[in-house]
Image (cartoon, coloured by chain):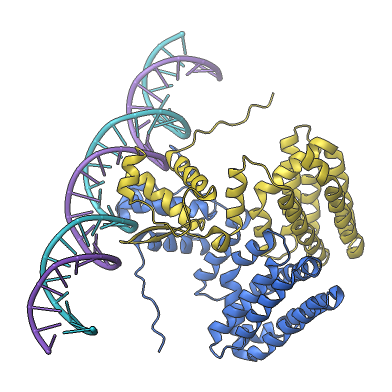
Chain colours: A yellow, B blue, C purple, D cyan
Amino acid sequence: MDFTKLKAPTLKELFVRELESMILSGKLKIGEKLPSERVLAEKMQVSRAVINGGISELARKGFLEVKPRSGVYVLDYRRYGTVETLLSIMNYNGGHLRRDEIQSILEIKIIVDKLAVELSVDRHSPEDIVSLEAYLEDILNDNVEKAAKAAFTFYHELAMTSQNTLLPLIYRSFRVPVNHLWIRFINKYGNKVVYNSAKNILKALKNKDKAKAIECVEKAISDSISGSKEIYEA
Amino acid sequence: MDFTKLKAPTLKELFVRELESMILSGKLKIGEKLPSERVLAEKMQVSRAVINGGISELARKGFLEVKPRSGVYVLDYRRYGTVETLLSIMNYNGGHLRRDEIQSILEIKIIVDKLAVELSVDRHSPEDIVSLEAYLEDILNDNVEKAAKAAFTFYHELAMTSQNTLLPLIYRSFRVPVNHLWIRFINKYGNKVVYNSAKNILKALKNKDKAKAIECVEKAISDSISGSKEIYEA
DNA sequence: ATTTTATTCTGGTCATACCAGTAGTACAGT
DNA sequence: ACTGTACTACTGGTATGACCAGAATAAAAT
């Protein structure tokens, strides 16, 4: 069995989801002024603390603009959104990605991974290889979700060894959607494929063979792309 | 004159900055448990609402982990941070970027821009070219800040024409630091250089010459890299 | 030593209140 | 007609104090 950890949503989280839905569905129009916190609190039967906290979170996500002592306004998330916005949109779609979104993610992943290995070949330490080898083995876990998580961790650690401070941060930003993709990929093709791809990359990295490493990355993802249509149909 | 908009910081913002400094400076060690909200509120002479709101914001930024009914713990921002973390680090350094951070940004920018033009060559519409040409001219603005903003807008719109939904989002995430870089670059070399680089890219794009377009991007940024040391010393 | 129970502590939430800044209005002075 | 003032209603930011349910830990029972 794999009983997953339970977590009750807080009122603030419920409020945030509710408003995200209303904005993404268009029920709340862009530029529109929200009712005051007091009114919202009364209408939704929660305290003002929940409303206030939820609103400031939505403001940080790029959905709302708070003008103190004036009011709260709906922002154009297509213009002011960041990567976090994508996660909200995804979540709104019931955790599913559209086909063009999958393709977008893979296009990004390939250049990020390529840069990671390209830099890592020159900059990694022997200790990095050791820890990467450990993470590599975790991909063979029978539990699909754990294997997907391990795959994410492997590539994340790989990005760390590039010594580029931003690469891991970017990787981290896309954790949720990439994890979804991996779960679907492993379900269809098994974790052995993922394992072998990663193993080849690591091997080339250890040999400091830059060209070979980049080639491995390209092959690993082009496999994903060719399979992405099927994944989408699944 | 250009009178800039005044804005008084709120207590929550002060609290967030204070804690970010303590974490980034190492005064608060990773894994350490923070005092309870009540204690913090008393010590810092503010209400619990401020502490509670500030903590949840820091949690969303990847600096803290909130375990309800247990406590608040300092997270390893290098491992769990997102792109937002970079902005905080930058802000902590008085708005300045360290040399390795500049290099990291440029390494990212080159692959992002390359992907943008690579995809755009096949996917852009004639209207895209028209609007890009308009943004291009804005780079010639004498006001340095406006020119930098225009440069950002040009590359952002370029990313939009790639039809990759994530590329613009990534671009926006890096708006602040990239803008800083451009201001410093233009101050040193003038906006004419930026204008010509962009113009060449656009020209190759219009001719659907993928190889030439990518070459232009590489040249534009390698100029920046070679100048980055000087920028850093400035 | 292990399990059960009781106590303390914590963040999440609620209710109420006051403050300072915004925005609109009406009005006085020019 | 325009400007500046005074008043007023409303808004988000903050303060205070309280209660809840779950987590952590100590105390008690087995």
- Residue at 67% from the left image edge and 42% from the top image edge: A96
Q: Toward which corner of the image does residue A92 lie, by quadrant?
A: top right
Pick the residue in front: A66 or B57.
Answer: A66
**With respect to residue A31, does B217 lie above or below?**
below
Q: Give percent across and percent down for residue B132.
A: 67, 77
Residue D16 is left or right of residue A87, and the answer is: left
**With respect to residue C14, does A53 lie above or below?**
below
Q: Is residue B64 visible?
A: no
Quadrant of the snapshot with the N terminus of chain A: top right
Q: Give percent across and percent down for residue B162.
A: 73, 65
Residue C1 is left or right of residue A134, and the answer is: left
Residue B46 is left or right of residue B203, and the answer is: left
Q: Give percent across and percent down for residue B19.
A: 44, 59
**With respect to residue A64, does B142 lie above or below?**
below
Pick the residue in front: A205 or A54.
Answer: A54
- Residue at 73% from the left image edge and 67% from the top image edge: B112
Q: Is residue B173 visible?
A: yes
Quadrant of the snapshot with the C terminus of chain A: top right
**With respect to residue A231, does C30 lie above or below?**
below
- Residue at 82% from the left image edge and 45% from the top image edge: A229
Residue A106 is left or right of residue A171, and the answer is: right
Pick the residue in front: A117 or A30.
Answer: A30
**Total number of numbered labels?**
0
Q: Toward which corner of the image does residue C24 lie, by quadrant?
A: bottom left
Q: Give percent across and percent down for residue A8.
A: 50, 33
